[in-house]
Image: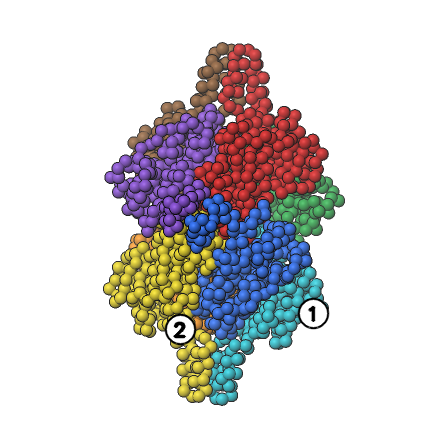
Chain colours: A blue, B red, C purple, D green, E yellow, F cyan, G brown, H orange
Amino acid sequence: MNNNDLSGLLKGVADGTVSIDDALLKIKQAPFDDLGYAKPDHHRHARQGIAEVIYGAGKTAEQIAGIAGSLLSHGEKRILITRLDNSKADKLKETAGFNYYPTARIGLIGSMPEKRTGKIVIATGGTSDMPVAEEAAITAEALGNNVVRLYDVGVAGIHRLLAHTDDIMTANAIVAIAGMEGALASVIGGLADCPVIAVPTSVGYGASFGGIAALLSMLNSCASGVSVVNIDNGFGAAYQASMINRRTSSE
Amino acid sequence: MNNNDLSGLLKGVADGTVSIDDALLKIKQAPFDDLGYAKPDHHRHARQGIAEVIYGAGKTAEQIAGIAGSLLSHGEKRILITRLDNSKADKLKETAGFNYYPTARIGLIGSMPEKRTGKIVIATGGTSDMPVAEEAAITAEALGNNVVRLYDVGVAGIHRLLAHTDDIMTANAIVAIAGMEGALASVIGGLADCPVIAVPTSVGYGASFGGIAALLSMLNSCASGVSVVNIDNGFGAAYQASMINRRTSSE
Amino acid sequence: MNNNDLSGLLKGVADGTVSIDDALLKIKQAPFDDLGYAKPDHHRHARQGIAEVIYGAGKTAEQIAGIAGSLLSHGEKRILITRLDNSKADKLKETAGFNYYPTARIGLIGSMPEKRTGKIVIATGGTSDMPVAEEAAITAEALGNNVVRLYDVGVAGIHRLLAHTDDIMTANAIVAIAGMEGALASVIGGLADCPVIAVPTSVGYGASFGGIAALLSMLNSCASGVSVVNIDNGFGAAYQASMINRRTSSE
Amino acid sequence: MNNNDLSGLLKGVADGTVSIDDALLKIKQAPFDDLGYAKPDHHRHARQGIAEVIYGAGKTAEQIAGIAGSLLSHGEKRILITRLDNSKADKLKETAGFNYYPTARIGLIGSMPEKRTGKIVIATGGTSDMPVAEEAAITAEALGNNVVRLYDVGVAGIHRLLAHTDDIMTANAIVAIAGMEGALASVIGGLADCPVIAVPTSVGYGASFGGIAALLSMLNSCASGVSVVNIDNGFGAAYQASMINRRTSSE
Amino acid sequence: MNNNDLSGLLKGVADGTVSIDDALLKIKQAPFDDLGYAKPDHHRHARQGIAEVIYGAGKTAEQIAGIAGSLLSHGEKRILITRLDNSKADKLKETAGFNYYPTARIGLIGSMPEKRTGKIVIATGGTSDMPVAEEAAITAEALGNNVVRLYDVGVAGIHRLLAHTDDIMTANAIVAIAGMEGALASVIGGLADCPVIAVPTSVGYGASFGGIAALLSMLNSCASGVSVVNIDNGFGAAYQASMINRRTSSE
Amino acid sequence: MNNNDLSGLLKGVADGTVSIDDALLKIKQAPFDDLGYAKPDHHRHARQGIAEVIYGAGKTAEQIAGIAGSLLSHGEKRILITRLDNSKADKLKETAGFNYYPTARIGLIGSMPEKRTGKIVIATGGTSDMPVAEEAAITAEALGNNVVRLYDVGVAGIHRLLAHTDDIMTANAIVAIAGMEGALASVIGGLADCPVIAVPTSVGYGASFGGIAALLSMLNSCASGVSVVNIDNGFGAAYQASMINRRTSSE
Amino acid sequence: MNNNDLSGLLKGVADGTVSIDDALLKIKQAPFDDLGYAKPDHHRHARQGIAEVIYGAGKTAEQIAGIAGSLLSHGEKRILITRLDNSKADKLKETAGFNYYPTARIGLIGSMPEKRTGKIVIATGGTSDMPVAEEAAITAEALGNNVVRLYDVGVAGIHRLLAHTDDIMTANAIVAIAGMEGALASVIGGLADCPVIAVPTSVGYGASFGGIAALLSMLNSCASGVSVVNIDNGFGAAYQASMINRRTSSE
Amino acid sequence: MNNNDLSGLLKGVADGTVSIDDALLKIKQAPFDDLGYAKPDHHRHARQGIAEVIYGAGKTAEQIAGIAGSLLSHGEKRILITRLDNSKADKLKETAGFNYYPTARIGLIGSMPEKRTGKIVIATGGTSDMPVAEEAAITAEALGNNVVRLYDVGVAGIHRLLAHTDDIMTANAIVAIAGMEGALASVIGGLADCPVIAVPTSVGYGASFGGIAALLSMLNSCASGVSVVNIDNGFGAAYQASMINRRTSSE
């Protein structure tokens, strides 16, 4: 709870418009709903400017629907559901305004928003990184961003990346997605003058150890200005990229 | 074998009421049954005040039934079977007094006991942690405890947790269950004045490494008074919480 | 901050004895001091019943003295400083009421308290585990507990442990400390009917990996009622054991 | 190739009974067959006193049959096939003299041998360790050993193990099999005066990491006289135990 | 090399003002110096808007001086040298305009720049994280940012952090620095509406594994909008935070 | 892009045969195709003397066909598709000139080339390593090499390897493939006078950790002249062996 | 405590020669001494046929002297002190009958015993493994064994090992010691017909990870009959080898 | 021992010029010297065309001198001693023909050889990689190769590497040395048409884990034709590069 809220509440108590018990109740109950299995956070939009996102893995379709219903009833217009597999998506397809993006494994309730002017580049090392890249791309678009997709520009054929220097030099934020050795993040980090958010993917085999090789590679990037999110976390990278782009762009 | 037993046995030998060979035999055979595949420990109730618990994973339904039968024939009134999957539970459903808790994957032979006065709080970071939380909750209830469930109070929306400060401040023991980064244990540990037993869960993906991230996080908690059990070990945490609550509460 | 504090503050605002700005200021500043390099938490004693403990590693002697001074000036009578090496202890020895326990690497400002009746057993696998055991023992004593030391009762000579069954059966909490394979925790866990808090130590070489072998062993204990703290964390185990003993014992 | 063979061959060359080219050919071709996909080692029986054992995992039933045929045609009377799953065993069941032990996942071509006098104890921590234990037991029996099975004598109920002190004190070699924290090996190692070969099993969950916890525990055993084989390697432990027993026992 | 450079060069060739060999030479040699042991990149300022930063570890004072000299001779006005220990700093102290920040282990050649309006918050979990925090703070200031230091606001006393909600809500970027369990990043991430760049530190012992526990914790943050840099990499986090702040602030 | 290309292009601009915009376009677009999901690199044959190889895992059959079509349309005569499973191979079987090698999981479009004179030895520790070995063998043959297969020559029966000293002493490059302890690479490395490229395989169980044991073993080989590729990477080893053989042999 | 002891004690109670309290006291106190910091086990010689061995690391010279004094006063004639560094050895050199072996870091109180007939081979991969090998050799000799040292017979020059086939074929037990890739154990395991106890050493660098590479290699040995002890544990390997040799040899 | 030797020996036996006992003795003793602590391999030059190299770490200066003396007395003209620290080098400086290269930590007895025509490129990511690079460079030169050093061409400033495309395109073998994220190997691997041998270095901090990050990155290189040696193993990479260059170049 930020200070303004608290200050306002205290003012209400002081001038008699709010009783002490009501104030205490409000502080404790206002910002979330209690569904037993979940406590949707209705305060997040105010606090962070972006609605609650539902992480679909490990929740039943019924639980997802319940949380979405709670959020919608509190006025949310757009709800993003990540890590939503096909079978759960099927059960949600009757929900009003629901759309499913299968490669990205994302469900969206509500329409895509207008796009702000600045752009986010989403680049991948290879074709196999596409599910993670699409999770990032759909997330970024659902958050109102203009997205440029540069897929399969891995460093084994460096000229494919260099050919897109224009896009890299003019982005507000870049999401660099790669499995195997994850070198893409460092090379882009050396070329770009905007923040690069690196996403290691679990693409690879053997000593890629499900993305650890790429993760370590990206954490040790010799290029400055590169930060990293969890393996396969396209959503998280796009979310932060959107935070950056929102501050930079005109809406 | 505790000293009283041994002392009593020696007394019997000294006063002629127990023969040497009988004494030796008793020491060796008394406290357990030998089923070949298992040796149920009938002495544990006396030694630890809590009946034998059957760990269901890696045992066949027949073996579980055999062990339960051996325990029942030695006077046990309540037997807890953990990590019991649906198909084994199905085979045991004819057993007298058998109940199955599917989310918790627990089978219980015998009825739930009376509850002692003190309470155990079981808190989770998210909805996906519920199977582990229910394993803890059912275990705690089967051991005679009053349980308060606080689910989905993870630190990303800290106000949801702060709203339950009352429960946290009045518990005798708290089981803090979280996957991903496991920060819940530290935040609760900083608020509570009773022991906090942290349970890392395998919820998450990528660099959560099946619960290692949460496990390490909890082991390194900057809050004092936090100890940790194995990943997904809701049973173990509840068992220790019950030991603490039993000593503190009036029965 | 607990609800009573907040409620009281709101009451003050409502009845005009506290101004809004003062209330806001109080909420934000009251419970800690800001030394720049540290923010000693003067609220912890009220919240958790135990004073702030200063973790000495990574702080200079000057910083430690500064934090201690802040706590003393807020009325603390006893301050525990852990992980305090010899050279820093030397610099603090002029502080009034300061005592240093070199094996435990603990400094204590103020005298040892009265002991409550219940006892805590502190057991070690070997002689080399003594520094960790003494950290636990001095901590437990500084928190008002009666401590029984059982050192060098490792499982390679199981009769040494069995000979102390009396102590184990009558403790309110047991701290089981062992390096190498850490089997002590499981064997004690199988004998005791009180909570066992296991402390893996970094004693060993090769595949003990600085305590990882003992840590994993303890996390996987086949005995119920065993929880674990960080490697070499004698303080943390004693702190939780004290929380348990305090609730169980008459003071 | 041992020196006697080489010496004999050179003698043959020197006295004209063996031509140089024949000698060279014999050195290169004699001791194994070349089936393309495998090179069965017909020399091992002479070299190590025990026939070739076929590791069934990763080989097709056809390859196994081919290797067995090659060995039989060179005079082997008994062939052990380990890690043989049900479906491959089915395909081999027509082979003359073939028997399948499903819990042990072992196939045996030929009859069980006479048993030598000394005994090997095979102990497990729990019921779930039985597949590994049976792999060890059948292997030991197929190599001519007298086996005593002590199953489910884990350290959480130490009296179950102490009750079998007789068996432990009179064995020529002990195979100690345990998952989870693997403490069984240390406790037995402290009681026995014969070599203890420890087998960590993959039984457990969470921080057992598929047997790593038990493996590390056993490698760090505080008891002298304990050595370790690979996780779940019942065969390897029994093989070495048999080597020890063979040297000690009268056949 | 960006397209404009290449395009301009090609124009020069086409209109005869640049010879082919000169063009080829320019493409190959222009953007860096070759000192044998190093190839300072004079093109970076143009490419990324920030001068080359010298990573001081693993270089001799002589090599550092050589690289700095090369950069200065190409017109750089401000050079940052990170991971510069005391003894190397001593050897460089005669360099014109050189200043050394010992806690941050940073050397700066040239004066601190004007500060842009937006602010970067740098928060730490504890006092021991200060060296990493100061590396971040000095870096951020050297890159022209307004820095707010919030040190020792770890989650074990959550009210210390909540008291600074104002700073957190009004920052353009936050650098969250913590060792041990690293929970600070998640809690801040749940409160803030700007990007949070998390820095795990090697502060801690035992199962903190030199910062791995905090690293994994931060990578698995349940809060959206958190990205991570390498353990102890205060520089890298500040560099990216500066990139974000520069785009958002008026200079 | 190599210098000759660039130089030629600049010459064209200088003598007026190439316009500036055309030159810039050519530099950016020439060497690859953009299929959206992939950017086939048509320049690789010129750059590396070997055509693009398609890594089949993580691509759909349609994507593979699309990439192959793009390569064929640019004049490639032979395309290797690795990690191609049965079901994808089925979908590609109508492609002109397509052949599938199931053990090797390789698809080849076009015929096998003539073989150069020098030979590559491919040796395995056991029968279970055959899939990796065949991936290496078919790759090497598709790249024009003469291959000698030495399968099942593991060090447990060292005479099987010593019998093939001739092959080892006369190879131009050796690919040593082994799982479990991976000792084969060191023993061959000690015998051979040509480069040995070691391939750890995921064959094994327990502490082989999916090939990590063999990988570490090979990286630490006490024999000089041994380098290592990723676990199960038969293709990569054969590719490098072919590079070596090509330089040494007459074509 | 073995059954005979217990049986005898009970007999004494039954026939009146031992009082109950004395019996209980004897059971509890007899087999060890309690020095506070240590509990020397005087029962081990009877139980295991070998005296207590003092692990010198982590004990002060004073503690070692105290434990040795306790053992000597209970009739021990020979005491082995392992991991004894130079400075502690210096402090013990006045002890009657004390000898120090610096390469082995072993102190021995009492003279070397007679040697039994059978022999133990101790082989190393390289010269750098000598400290571990000498720990094994001196231990084996102190336990009454005939030792053959084969140092620097690593697999990179396999003929050096093959030249000693005689020794390998006639040993009762072999201790195979190697760092780096640890292949020595497998090659010896393939040649020998007696148990091979492998000791990984911390010799190496980089990806040897302080002996992990050798440890994993040895655990995965493709040769049957190989077991493993902890990294650098020359003592443990020799202890088990002696157990085997003692049973096999005439004394 | 190769077949020709054995064949010749057998011929000698057959025609009576060699006695059986002499032959046996020769096979066993010929190819190495036995110094007790080491067994220098005088056969290696014949077998591998390159003299024995002494690994200096873990050997005393006296042992090194002894091994060198043995090799010199068997006719070696040039002996390379790697991992030779300053203090041991000092003790060897009186040896005839001894030279020490301090950055490379290499001692060389005898003069540098003539250089063959083909060249080996040795490239590093940064200045801090120089000790490993010089170990590679001096080794390569001592083995008769022409070396081109490209230091500090890391991917964060990719134009520095592209500027040396000529050297990369014309090498016979490339040694790519990098710490941190190790991306250099992939980028070079994508440009070169000769084998690239990658050397991860321990340069870096935090999640570089002493070179593991670079090691994994290089093992997972998306470029074909890249193999890897141990962390910091400049010698091993140069040794294999020399094997390749020797076969390709005219001497």
Q: Tell me: residue H32, above or below residue G13.
A: below
Q: Where does the image place residue G176, in percent across and percent down from the top left?
A: 48, 43
Q: Where does the image place residue A68, in percent across and percent down from the top left?
A: 60, 54
Q: Could you tell me which residue is drawn at 36 percent across and 66 percent down?
A: E116
Mark 1, Cα crowd under 10 Å, few <14 / some 14-19 / many 20+, is few
Q: Tell me: residue G232, above or below residue A182.
A: above
Q: Is residue C18 left or right of residue C172?
A: left
Q: Where does the image place residue A179, in percent across and percent down from the top left?
A: 54, 61
Q: Say whether residue F60 is visible.
A: yes
Q: Could you tell me which residue is drawn at 39 percent across and 68 percent down?
A: E250
* Marking on residue F95: 1
Mark 2, Cα crowd under 10 Å, few <14 / some 14-19 / many 20+, is few
Could you tell me which chain the residue with mark 2 belongs to?
E
Q: Could you tell me which residue is drawn at 70 percent across and 66 percent down?
A: F93
Q: Where does the image place residue C169, in percent across and percent down from the top left?
A: 48, 26
Q: Say whether residue F143 is visible.
A: no
- Which one is nearer the viewer's eye here, H236 or B75? B75
Mark 1: secondary structure: loop
Q: Which residue is mark 2?
A: E46
Q: Quadrant of the C terminus of chain F?
A: bottom right
Q: Could you tell me which residue is drawn at 65 percent across and 47 percent down?
A: D56
Q: Is residue D85 left or right of residue C44?
A: right
User: Residue lying farthest front?
Assistant: A16
- Which one is nearer the viewer's eye here, C71 or C53? C71
Quarter-wise, where is residue E32 in the image? bottom left
Quarter-wise, where is residue F54 in the image? bottom right
Amino acid type of the residue that numbered disc 1 sits on in the rendered structure: Thr
